[in-house]
Image: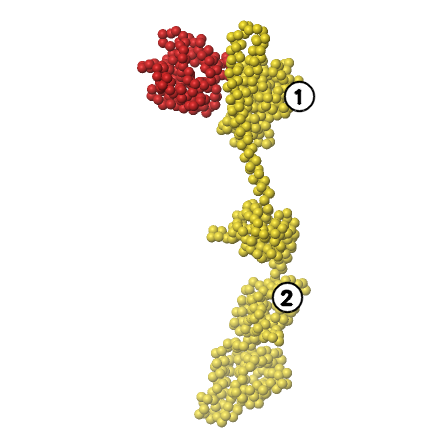
Chain colours: A yellow, B red
Amino acid sequence: MTREPPCDLEREAGHVSVPHASTANLGEDALWDSEEKYLKLLDGIKDYAIFMIDPHGQILSWNTGAERIKGYKAEEIIGRNFSCFFPKQDIERGRPEEVLRLAAASGSHEERGMRLRKDGSRFLASVTFTALYDRNGRLRGFSEFSHDLSEKTKSEAKYRGLLEAAPDAMVVVNQGGEIVLLNVQAEKQFGYSRDELVGQRVTNIIPEGFAERLIADGTRSAAEALAQQIGTGIELTGRRKNGSGFPIEIMLSPLESAEGILVTAAIRNISVRKDAELHLAQMEGRYRGLLEAAPDAMVVVNQGGEIVLLNVQAEKQFGYSRDELVGQRVTNIIPEGFAERLIADGTRSAAEALAQQIGTGIELTGRQKDGSEFPIEIMLSPLESAEGILVTAAIRNITERKQSEEHLVKTVRELKRSNDELQQFAYVASHDLQEPLRMVASYTQLLAQRYKGRLDSDADEFITYAVDGSTRMQGLIQDLLTYSRAGTNGKALRAISGETALNEALASLRATIEESGAIVTHDPLPTITTDGTQLAQVFQNLVGNAIKYHGAQTPQVHVSAAKNGGGEWIFSVRDNGMGIDPQYFDRIFVLFQRLHGPTKFKGTGIGLAICKKMLDGLGGRIWVESQPEKGSTFYFTVPERNGN
Amino acid sequence: MESIGNGAAPIEVLLVEDNPGDVRLTREAFKDAKVHINLHVASDGAEAMSFLGRQGDYAHVPRPDLILLDLNLPKKDGREVLGEIKASPALMSIPVVILTTSASEADILRSYKLHANCYITKPVGLGGFLEVIKSIDSFWLSVVKLPREEHS
């Protein structure tokens, strides 16, 4: 215990208390007189009670400080015994006499103790008794210097200021468990006014867990008991005046004061945090449920790369039991590429590192307990928890997908090769077939020209069939060649007016149109970005067919275009011709499929097949709507590109 | 190598063609030609180059006034023959007409880049073929002025 510092005065008092040594040459009365003089000098001092008593405790002098502190006037008290300043129980114990005995024995005695004022109120006093002797060493009496420790000192005032400035509720409690001091936040927090709390037991506002901490038990001193709690946040329950409880966290710190060690408690209302924690705990509970319900293996990892949580699918997938994985490094099951992503490097924080990975499917390799590896895809997402940001990894075994991807790639490659081969085959076959056929056709024709009518009629007929057959075969091969080339040019797509393409087609069909007297009309047609040559060929085939397969009336063909919602232009070519039975709608687009014999309509059945192939290549479609005798409408789509 | 027609200055034509059927058809078509034509035939590219270089058996053949060249030939390809003719100062002035079944745009472009004088795809029909040979006759052998070689 340290004493509060009203030191200058006390030191001065100390000087005064031992004058007998330095005044040894004076007579004893003179000495006593000089003591009295000194005391008179001290009479004006207000902060200290200073007075003299005789060897039996009878009061001999009285100063202003004594009057102020103890409440007695000099005339009231001089001559009375100083034991009247002691509480009753101390008197009964013989404390006043003991104090004097101690002072007489050692020359001085110092103590702290409760004292009574004239009005009976008690106060804690710091008291120094000094024995006074005469020249012969005979005890003449004592001087008493005392000080009221409960009076506010300057440092206490400063402390109070600090207390009020603190953001938390602050309560200062003595070791008896009584509230000594509190700040306005504490008043608000607990709903009491200051006066209602000072001097009250702290258990009124913190029923459990605080007062117990202040008290020494059999194994430790109060200071030790306290030291164990210093600085730690202790979660307790506070009780308001209205009886309601709320969660608090208290931080204790010791405060040495004149009254001994006090305990300052900073009290924080942690209702909000508690609610949040509860919410989080519920969320975690729910999250755990979700985790187990997930179809994928799920592993939750902290930023240190340790597995915090996993679900049963993860156990199965990696062949470990849960206990074998929790707390282990995630690199045990995903050797590369995952842990690295959790870690901040020089250019990014952990949160940023993570943010870059969120949601993306990362293909890595997983390792099972038996050491076998398998391809996985992981999706990361952050999870804020009480333990900091965790990372949830959904881990999918993509062995099958990988296999099917490989299979698909292989199939596509094979398909492309066989398609290329087929194309090459069609071209080479038709081209190479054409050479010998040209010979057959040319020479049968030459034969017919030079020998018709010069052989017998059988020969003429045979030659006619040979010429006819070879001519038709030439047509087929020519068409096959055209078909195999159609749409394979890979020309750059350019913006072309639909009307330009149609006009090109009509120019090629001029003779046909004139012969048939057909009337071809059209609506305004859009400009689209496509292969103009192919578009013209499609128009030529469709308009040509519309005229060729006419009905009883003069052929009328109308071309129009409309935009559909799917980013396409739909072109239509409508005629008033003979129409098509719906059962043949698909067949007419197949190569060399015809609905009529060669005697009625010439042709090999390639026009629509070529149209379909070209439109397939341009990303479009073609279809027909028709009824026999009621005309047909052929529709085809072309994707609108470049914003057309 | 037979002489066609009876004009004072017969026109020497070298036909480079491996198909005897086409050779015969060409010969038939030139029968009605307005001018005297000496039609020489080489059945592959190597033979054509020997003819033009007057090597071996061809030491005494005339320098052709016009060459009809097929592209797809055994031994030496028509494209190579064309390149060699047009790279040779002695031969480059001889007009070369490409007469082939190929209608491929790549072949057409390549031939003109090698300085072919014109490119004709053989028509598939007899009538068309005869027509083409007649037009070669009327254009290249009648209308066009061909360079005459001094040392023939």
Tell me if residue A293 can be seen.
Answer: yes
SS for dot 2: loop
User: Measured along the vertical axis of the image, is residue B66 above or below residue A172?
Assistant: above
Q: Residue at x 52, y 19 (%)?
A: A434
Q: Residues within 10 Å of mark 2 (few under 14, many from 20)?
A: some
Q: Residues within 10 Å of mark 1 (few under 14, many from 20)?
A: some
| Image quarter in which the N terminus of chain A is found | bottom right
Which of the pair A305/A324 is nearer the observer?
A: A324
Which of the pair A427/A634 is nearer the observer?
A: A427
Which chain is mark 1 on?
Answer: A
The spot of residue B93 in percent (x, y) is: 35, 18
Circle 2 is placed at which residue position?
Answer: A192
User: Measured along the vertical axis of the image, is residue B1 above or below residue B82?
Assistant: above
Q: Are marks 1 and 2 on the same chain?
A: yes
The spot of residue A210 in percent (x, y) is: 62, 69
The spot of residue A200 in percent (x, y) is: 64, 71
Image mark for residue A324: none
- Nearest to the eye among marks 1 and 2: give it: 1
> Is tag 1's residue or tag 2's residue first in the polypeptide sequence?
2
The amino acid type, in three-letter code, at marker 1 is: Asp
Which of the pair A69/A411 is nearer the observer?
A: A411
Which chain is mark 2 on?
Answer: A
CA–CA distance between discs 1 and 2? 98 Å
User: Measured along the vertical axis of the image, is residue A545 above or below residue A618?
Assistant: above
Q: Residue at x 37, y 14 (%)?
A: B65
Circle 1 is placed at which residue position?
Answer: A581
